[in-house]
Image (cartoon, rainbow, N blue to C red):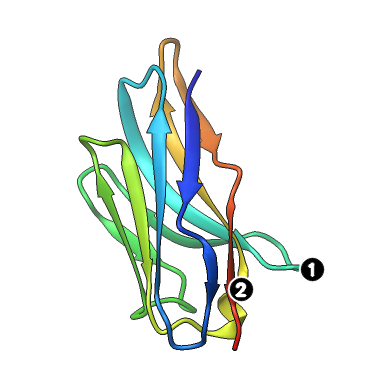
Amino acid sequence: QVQLVESGGGLVQPGGSLRLSCAASGSIFSINVMAWYRQAPGRQRELVATITAPGNTNYADSVKGRFTISRDNAKNTVYLQMDSLKPEDTAVYSCYAEILGRLSWMNYWGKGTLVTVSS
């Protein structure tokens, strides 16, 4: 059973920083794309950032220059460094990964971690 577990959310003041982590565990043979999504109250889920296995990254325009996605392939973990946080960054952040398990490639989601940016 493959699982994704996020950590690192919390309350931070505007202009502050947080680092999210998401660790994949279980029967994992390979991980392709890993990503972070977020969903704010009353809004649709949006893609924040993606990273491929070799390390190619893409970001939503709203977070470019403020957020950095990275991954540790040896630890099956993806990170999201969030700097210069704004109140509009408040959301539940979830990680996503394309994982080759025992049978085939499948898409997995974590349960999410809440980030609140407020003074």
Alpha-carbon neighbours of circle 2 within 10 Å: few (<14), some, or many (≥20)?
many
Q: Can you give x and y, in whole percent of width and height, for residue 22 in the image?
A: 42, 46
What residue is shown at x 44% (from left), y 88% (from top)? Answer: 15
- Name the residue tied to disc 2: 90
Q: Can you give x and y, in whole percent of width and height, for residue 24 in the image?
A: 40, 34
Q: Nearer the viewer, mark 2 or mark 1?
A: 2
- Asked whether 61 or 3 is in front, the reply is 3
In the depicted structure, whether residue 54 falls above or below residue 79: above
- Res 43 → quadrant: bottom right
Alpha-carbon neighbours of circle 1 within 10 Å: few (<14), some, or many (≥20)?
few
- Name the residue tied to disc 1: 42
Amino acid type of the residue that numbered disc 1 sits on in the rendered structure: Gly
Q: Secondary structure at mark 1?
A: loop
Report, in whole angstroms, how far the alpha carbon at label 2 lies from the one at label 1.
12 Å
- Res 25 → quadrant: top left
In the depicted structure, whether residue 105 falls above or below residue 56: above
Q: Are marks 2 and 1 in contact (CB under 8 Å)?
A: no
